[in-house]
Amino acid sequence: MTAYKSPTPSPPERNAELASNRSPLRLAAAQFFRHRLAVAGVVLIALLVLSAVFAPYLTPYEPTKLNLQSKLTPPSWQFPLGTDHFGRDVLTRMLYGARISLLVGLGVVVIAAGIGTPLGVISGFFGGTLDNTIMRMMDALLTFPPLLLAVAIMGTLGADTQNVILAVGLVYIPVFARLARGNTLSLRESTYVSASVALGAPNWRIIVLDILPNIIGVLVVLVTVTFSKAVILEASLSFLGLGVQPPTASWGRDLNEARRYIEDAWWLAAFPTFMIAASVLNMNFIGDGLRDALDPRTNQ
Amino acid sequence: MGIWLYFLRRLVQVPLVIFFVSVIIFALMKVTPGDPISIMLGPYATPETTAALKAEFNLDKSLPEQYLLWIWNLLHGDLGASIRSQEPVTEMVANRFPVSLTIALMATLLSLLIAIPAGVLAAYRRNSLWDYVLMGFSTIGLSVPTFTLALVLILFFALKLQWVPISGIGLRTLSDGFWPFVLPYIIPVVALAVTTIAELARIVRASMLEVLDQEYIRVARAQGLGDSVVLRVHALKNVFIPIITVIAIIFAFQVGNTITIEYLFSIPGVGSALINAVISRDFPVIQGLTLVVGIFFIGMNLLADILYAVVDPRIHYN
């Protein structure tokens, strides 16, 4: 018997739902919650956010206070994840590092979506030379791999947390602009817009009421993807010494400092690695679930 | 006829993009907080030396003039010299770029070797255990930063198992024997390749799925052709179209990704030069390297567009 299978039809639940009269939002939500991985992702990320926010209450230790007496101890009851070369509790540093990663991710997404989306929508809506100019500028930014561009920008601005957010945000503006523009272009020809134009609606009204609500779906997916990429970029920049500066706790930064002690103190490298991988993995699951729920083109 | 017009239009856009890239790089340098002259001179900053150095670097002229002078020098092959070592940037590029390119090339080849069969297999046996396992690895591969993976690999294979050394790229030549030459490359190249394998496998799987769902595949099977024939003769050919177009971009991005790896393994490439320049605020080097790398990427993007137009016979450009 051949191993090749013909394309699977969509599951009967989805068909039944599509035939019903529920709103698109309810349909999308139902589809999303059908993804066990995505739901797990939401739960775990929520856990991460809560731990980051309530970090001071979850641990008796300070993330930056030196405690040279207990330096480089392996995981134990007193220090569940061990201590680093300054005697700082690794678990505490992981929790406070989560704060930094989440903060950077959020800031980056706000900048990239906040600036990129309007740019893309305006560019796509009005077209012409404005469109051409804006898109060539976006192309100029997009030719560089994100890390390279971020390194160059950090080199100019100087390395601290705020600049990391600015630099990485700038790197992802063109991504949002491109997506917004593409969707705006196709929506421009849609019946919603033609109807509004026929009714004499001013441009801004068309943009806000017809175009924006229809691109939100893909934007949300891009937001989750960008969030996870921002976390990775922050870790990379901090690893290179160009991101978050010591003594502030950052997973990437801690990985850099773990290099020297890696042979004897495996826990210094293992736990930041786990935190980065787990966070990004869960965010990617959420992104996959969202994409399946909100993107009308998916086929399995 | 249409395809030549497309090339022409595409080619005309390139100078505009290069212009914006140069403006961005120039602007980056001018936005730097602090006065580079006083940084450079340190305790020797007197009014005379400051004025002299300013004139030498053209910093006493207006911004548009400075930009034009910079471009003029560029067109004459002068990218400036490192503030620290006085080494001309063009020499730096000539020495270091090939190293980064080699590593990126090896990583890209490895990715192709692994990702294509993996993606094809996952698509062919879609929704089976193979599919889930392979795509599971792909998801994990996309979630781990390259340097993190490299550290883990170092921990296991270099330190615990002692199978491969950590550094040593460029220290030996082929005359020392094949294995001693190749060994130091293994961990860096593998670490670099993993993210690309993850992405490429997904792309291969997606396009394979699209191809397999086409009518002509069904027709071939209805005619009684066996699996392997269908796969080889009909399916694989068409999967390669999007892959070929993506390769140039992948290669370009690999070159960018080598930054952390070069830092970690002390590889004398463009990435580590850039990092050192950033740390020591060596502006001519940052400017020059970023520009060269930027133009390289613009070229790769152009190549990808051209390949796409050439390889896909279905596309008409008018």
Image: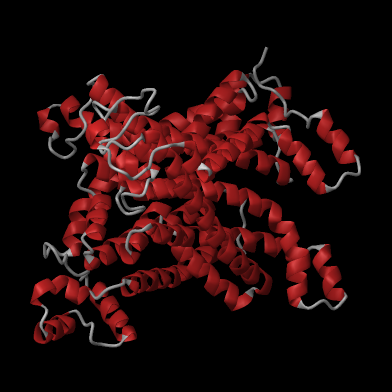
Q: In this rendering, is residue B17 above or below A183?
A: below
- Residue A116 x %, y %: 57, 64
| Quarter of the image with the C terminus of chain B in it | bottom right
> Residue B280 falls in which quadrant of the image?
bottom left
Residue at the far top: name it: A1
Side of A124 where B58 appears, left or right: left
> Residue A198 falls in which quadrant of the image?
bottom right
Q: Can residue B255 be seen in this view?
A: no
Side of B304 where A193 appears, left or right: right
Write the residue at 81% across / 47% down: A24
- Residue B293 x %, y %: 32, 58
Side of B133 where B273 appears, left or right: left
Which residue is at the front of the view, B305 or A53?
A: A53
Q: In this rendering, is residue B316 above or below A89?
A: below
| Quarter of the image with the N terminus of chain B in it | bottom right
Q: Is residue B140 visible?
A: yes
Count all numbered tags in the image, as a single digit: 0
- Residue B299 x %, y %: 39, 59
Which residue is at the front of the view, B32 or B82?
A: B32
Write the residue at 29% across / 76% down: B71
